[in-house]
Image (tube, coloured by chain):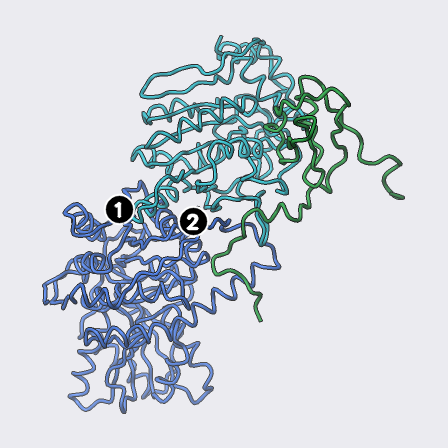
């Protein structure tokens, strides 16, 4: 069924379709409406779940950890400061291998205060051990949340997943979304319970470990995270078989055939770049787009094989890792290091922080700047800020 | 009691371990316990071994009651009944760093039991002062004695009007066990605050751990009572009464108390 | 090869009791003074280690001390109202360099 949904509504409907059992969230702008909508579903009897009206974001994720430990399917909704406040708990969730799914409505981190979108909140948690999936539109939000549960609960994975979409641009903007039938989702998403806290099978969770075990636990956790790339592709294929929609698994590729100059980006900028690619292709310019859907684990090998034949790569980052640059450009460069000097130059632009609009004209302008540098044999700077006069 | 077994690595004469063992007598095997950062979170587990025989989770410091809330919700959606969900925290995990999640869970009247085992200082990190450390007590970060008064956690928790609230002392195990048994029968948020001395923090001999927990009651500084539906009832009236100095002067941490300070404590003691 | 570990970092129940290590800290241990203990069981509540048990014998209940668990704090002896326990030093000869 087709519905006009904003990102938060898509999240709420995904929660209902996924038959989420425990919602633990603390209100924050702009994620709160998603939480409120799910609570309405619960109170109307449309979703059989418990809502824990926690007193903080930290407790929200802590309660989800408790719910997952006791075998339920939890959802958390948050963003920016809320996510930062949860930071410590994120590491427990991943270290305990809990299949928690969290919708994150990306918003710039204060200070200065902002309510507007960028990926800084997500990137700050890049090392937290969570799978991080970025969505470019509300259809992808709904589909990805459903995929996230199957991925998180897969025996080979057993890790928490963040599903990212941007504040206002997505959370409060309605788009046409195809909503799958509940029976279809039930088929796709059977519930596997693995309670770690069970009175019939008692065990002690998170006991003190020494140097003999800690590193082995971490090795296994990292391996599960790396292996989840393949599982995500499988999950995406299975989803496509049921719904007809695939998001490419870890990466979305667009018009890479014969592309000499490839844009790489994540989230809503992917839609903008896709338009620009079409515009420039009409002018006969050999451009393409690589959309990174899965930022953690980073599909470095695939990125390398898709980009290594390009002449030029331009990465657009809606985040800044202070003193380092754009997180995505850093990943792309790291994955291209292997091919040696014959690999493409990677130009890195920081753009669209805190909701500063990046239009298709801006992307064209960036393209032109990069092409001028290429013609002038100018090697790329580590990164540049776009739109700072 | 052996749901927390011997073989744990608590200090000799550990008051916290005594409290846990006494509580297990009442709580029984259908109990899930969440313990945030504290001595009790660490002494019962090492590597691939544990002293717990019930489901146990060593949670983060701030959030044991929130975790317990999530566990209860998960049990409810799965239709799993007759399980005690317990958050068991030290004085820091209750009164200080853990207070936000505690007040939240109490206000929501979550169906959990929170036990604060109080040794009146941060012993797991070496004995620093916290919110329940009494006025005048020497700790590693109040070398001249704590200049401020103890936080009144019982008054704070009573202000949440929980269905059940009680104090306890490890020197009165039957009283503590009875209270836990009564608490088990009640639905909603239950708060029990048990005094569990730490001989290292208090500067007493290790065999005096229980004796101090008794003297605290006998001198009137630690009253044993419960509050159900707003009604306060004393549960133990000590057979003998002692002046506060018999309790305080025995503890090295109070070695700098003046006569005036003693008078302050005497005035605070219930008679 | 990484060690074979549980997916959720955890430990099976009661396993610390199987190989207790901390009893090695013991410097003294309780001994029952013949004829004084009436097996009231009060000390069981005060032992932090679960080292005390009442066992059923032909003569009725009897206090039993498990030295695998006992760390020698002395609370049992200190608390016993009948003074039925005494603490005895773990070692008889000098300790230290030659110990």
Helix, strand or loop under label 1: strand
The colour assigned to chain C within the rendered structure: green
Chain corresponding to blue in the figure:
A
Q: Chain of mark 2?
A: A
Quarter occupied by the N terminus of chain B: top right
The colour assigned to chain B within the rendered structure: cyan
The total of numbered circles placed on residues is 2
Answer above or below: position of A343 versus B210: below
The alpha-carbon separation of the residues under discs 2 and 1 comes to 19 Å
Residue B83, numbered circle? none
Residue B147 visible here: no
Helix, strand or loop under label 2: loop
Q: Position of residue A269 (x, y in %)?
A: 23, 71
Nearest to viewer (mark 2 / mark 1): 2
Answer above or below: position of A381 versus A46: below
Location of mark 2 (residue):
A198
Of B56 and A144, nearer the camera is: B56
Location of mark 1 (residue):
A50
Q: Position of residue A111 (x, y in %)?
A: 32, 51
Instruction: Give the class, few, some or many, for how many residues have Cα within 10 Å of label 2's Cα (few <14, many ≥20).
Output: many
């Amino acid at each position: 069924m087709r519905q006009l949904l904003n990102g938060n509504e898509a999240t709420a409907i995904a929660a209902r379709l996924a038959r989420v059992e425990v919602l633990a969230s603390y209100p924050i702008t702009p994620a709160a409406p998603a939480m409120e909508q799910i609570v309405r579903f619960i109170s109307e009897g449309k979703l059989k779940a418990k809502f824990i009206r926690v007193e903080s974001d930290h407790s929200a994720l802590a309660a989800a950890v408790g719910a997952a430990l006791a075998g339920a399917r939890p959802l958390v909704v948050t963003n920016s400061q809320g996510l930062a406040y949860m930071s410590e708990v994120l590491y427990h969730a991943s270290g305990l291998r809990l299949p928690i799914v969290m919708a994150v409505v990306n918003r710039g981190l204060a200070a200065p205060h902002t309510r507007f979108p960028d990926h800084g909140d997500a990137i700050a948690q890049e090392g937290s051990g969570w799978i991080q999936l970025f969505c470019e539109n509300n259809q992808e939000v709904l589909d990805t949340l459903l995929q996230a549960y199957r991925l998180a609960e897969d025996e080979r994975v057993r890790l928490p997943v963040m599903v990212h979409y941007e504040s206002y641009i997505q959370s409060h903007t309605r788009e046409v979304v195809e909503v799958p039938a509940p029976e279809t989702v039930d088929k796709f998403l059977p519930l596997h319970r693995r309670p770690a806290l069970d009175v019939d099978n008692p065990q002690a969770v998170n006991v003190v470990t020494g140097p003999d075990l800690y590193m082995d636990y971490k090795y296994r956790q990292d391996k599960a995270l790396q292996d989840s790339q393949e599982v995500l592709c499988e999950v995406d294929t299975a989803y496509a078989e049921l719904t007809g929609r695939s998001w490419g698994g870890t990466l979305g590729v667009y018009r890479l055939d014969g592309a000499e100059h490839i844009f790489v980006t994540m989230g809503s900028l992917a839609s903008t770049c896709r338009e620009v690619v079409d515009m420039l292709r009409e002018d006969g310019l050999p451009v393409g787009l690589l959309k990174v859907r899965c930022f953690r684990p980073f599909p470095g090998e695939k990125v390398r094989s898709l980009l290594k034949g390009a002449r030029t790569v331009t990465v657009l980052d809606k985040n800044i890792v202070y003193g380092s640059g754009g997180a995505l450009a850093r990943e792309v460069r790291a994955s291209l290091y292997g091919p040696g000097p014959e690999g493409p130059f990677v130009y890195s632009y920081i753009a669209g922080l805190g909701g500063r609009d990046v239009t298709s004209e801006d992307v064209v302008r960036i393209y032109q700047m990069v092409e001028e540098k290429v013609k002038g044999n100018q090697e790329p700077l580590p990164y540049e800020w776009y739109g700072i006069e | 009691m052996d749901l927390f077994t011997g073989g744990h690595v608590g200090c000799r004469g550990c008051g916290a371990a005594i409290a846990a063992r006494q509580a297990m007598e009442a709580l029984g095997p259908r109990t899930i316990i969440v313990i945030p950062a504290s001595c009790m979170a660490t002494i019962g587990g090492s590597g691939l071994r544990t002293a717990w025989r019930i489901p146990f989770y060593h949670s983060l410091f701030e959030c044991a009651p929130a975790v317990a809330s999530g566990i209860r919700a998960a049990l409810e959606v799965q239709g799993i009944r007759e399980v005690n969900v317990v958050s068991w925290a030290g004085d820091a995990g209750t009164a200080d760093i853990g207070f936000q999640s505690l007040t939240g869970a109490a206000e929501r009247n979550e169906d959990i039991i929170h036990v604060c085992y109080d040794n009146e200082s941060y012993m797991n990190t070496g004995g620093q002062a916290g919110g329940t450390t009494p006025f005048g007590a020497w700790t590693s970060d109040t070398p001249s004695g704590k200049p401020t008064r103890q936080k009144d956690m019982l008054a704070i928790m009573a202000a949440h009007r929980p269905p059940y609230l009680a104090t306890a002392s490890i020197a009165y195990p039957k009283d503590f066990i009875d209270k836990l048994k009564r608490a088990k029968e009640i639905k909603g948020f239950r708060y029990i605050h048990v005094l569990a001395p730490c001989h290292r923090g208090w500067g007493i001999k290790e065999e005096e751990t229980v004796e101090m927990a008794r003297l605290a009651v006998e001198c009137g500084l630690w009253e044993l009572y419960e509050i159900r539906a707003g009604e306060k009832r004393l549960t133990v009236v000590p057979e003998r009464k002692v002046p506060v100095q018999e309790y305080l002067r025995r503890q090295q941490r109070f070695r700098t108390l003046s006569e005036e300070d003693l008078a302050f404590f005497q005035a605070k003691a219930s008679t | 090869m990484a060690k074979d570990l549980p997916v959720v970092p955890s430990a099976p129940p009661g396993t610390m009791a199987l190989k207790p290590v901390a009893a090695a800290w013991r410097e003294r241990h309780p001994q029952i003074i013949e004829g004084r203990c009436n097996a009231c069981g009060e000390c069981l509540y005060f032992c932090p280690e679960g080292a005390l048990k009442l066992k059923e014998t032909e003569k009725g209940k009897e206090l039993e001390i498990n030295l695998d668990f006992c760390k020698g704090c002395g609370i049992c002896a200190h608390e016993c109202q009948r003074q039925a326990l005494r603490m005895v030093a773990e070692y008889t000869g000098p300790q230290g360099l030659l110990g």
